[in-house]
Image (cartoon, rainbow, N blue to C red):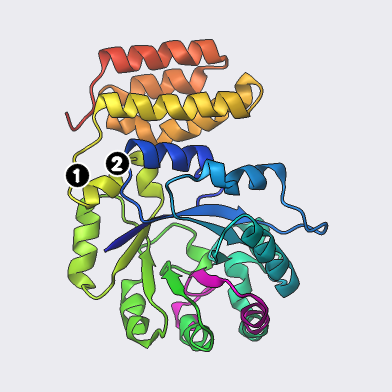
Amino acid sequence: MKLYLAPLEGITGWIFRDAVNRCFGGFDKYFVPFIRPNQMGHLSAREKKDILPEHNQNMYTIPQILTNRADDFVRTANKLKEYGYSEVNLNLGCPSRTVVTKGRGSGFLAYPDKLDAFLGEIFESCDMKISIKTRLGMEDPEEFRRLIEIYNKYPVCELIIHPRVQKDFYRNMPDREMFGEVLPKSRSSVCYNGDIFTPEDYQNFIKDFPDVQCVMTGRGVLADPALGRRIRGGGDANKEELRRFHDMLYRGYCEEMSGDRTILYKMKELWTYLAPAFTNSKKYAKKIKKAEKCFVYESVINELFEKEETVTS
């Protein structure tokens, strides 16, 4: 079984991916949050840092591209090739309204004929492997019957299916019935993505779908950065490992970002997921949320790791 770390915009940047890989491992591929091609054809400073080879050492890293313009996709893919990448991923799954209203991400799924023409152009023009991360459609899972016919026309190296529609966002249960129905129809290898938060979730999934050889998880890793390792039979994250993981992230953000507010925004986002891993988590979650200066935050974190234990210990 292969395990992939999902791309989560604003969260799983290179600092996060590097910390997960070095502290816990467990993943075969690490996906870069989407690159949005701009009119000038240049990568932003953030995008460059995210894909630099020196920031992705000892990881099989796949950049993701978000666009509905074939020329933008091809130009960006060629630029990524210059950095040494041989595979790129097309984002057809992002449910954000700001993305969807522009016909990108899962919004592109509402225009199957345009999507078909787009795929024809990029597969003809790119000499790189192209995988696709997709939802089932915009409003109705039945839309995927048409979409799978389109995907099957092209040499998609891997089809990553999140079995929700755009209007679900991350609510409701993944539609595994539709997933199971279209699974044998795909000419590409299929990776499942959706609500794998624990090793038990993973085991229950493979019981139902023993033929699926690849699973992607994202939000589950925010709450448990050792999830990949645990799925593979390894141990829970202990307090010392979580301290090391935290310190790598915090140090990385302090070096890359300026201003306490910006740094603490990133760390507070992490703790909304990670806090329940500790005893008395609500008490410390409140203190972390109230911290407005890094020195205050550091004091709270030192107290947390000194006085509390992980829930699993």
**Magenta segment range?**
118-143
SS type, badge 2: loop
| Label disc, if present, on residue 234 of the rendered structure | 1
Q: Is residue 293 above or below residue 7?
A: above
Amino acid at the residue labelled 1? Gly
Residue at the spot x=47%, y=84% of the render? Answer: 148
Residue at the spot x=62%, y=23% of the render? Answer: 261
Q: Residue furthest right?
A: 40
First in residue order: circle 1 vs circle 2:
2
Q: Is residue 252 magenta?
A: no
Q: Is residue 242 above or below residue 83?
A: above
Circle 2 sits on which residue? 226
Q: Quadrant of residue 82?
A: bottom right
Q: Is residue 141 magenta?
A: yes
Q: Position of residue 272 (x, y in %)?
A: 42, 34
Q: Position of residue 52 (x, y in %)?
A: 60, 46
Q: Quadrant of residue 309?
A: top left
Residue at the spot x=78%, y=58% of the render? Answer: 41
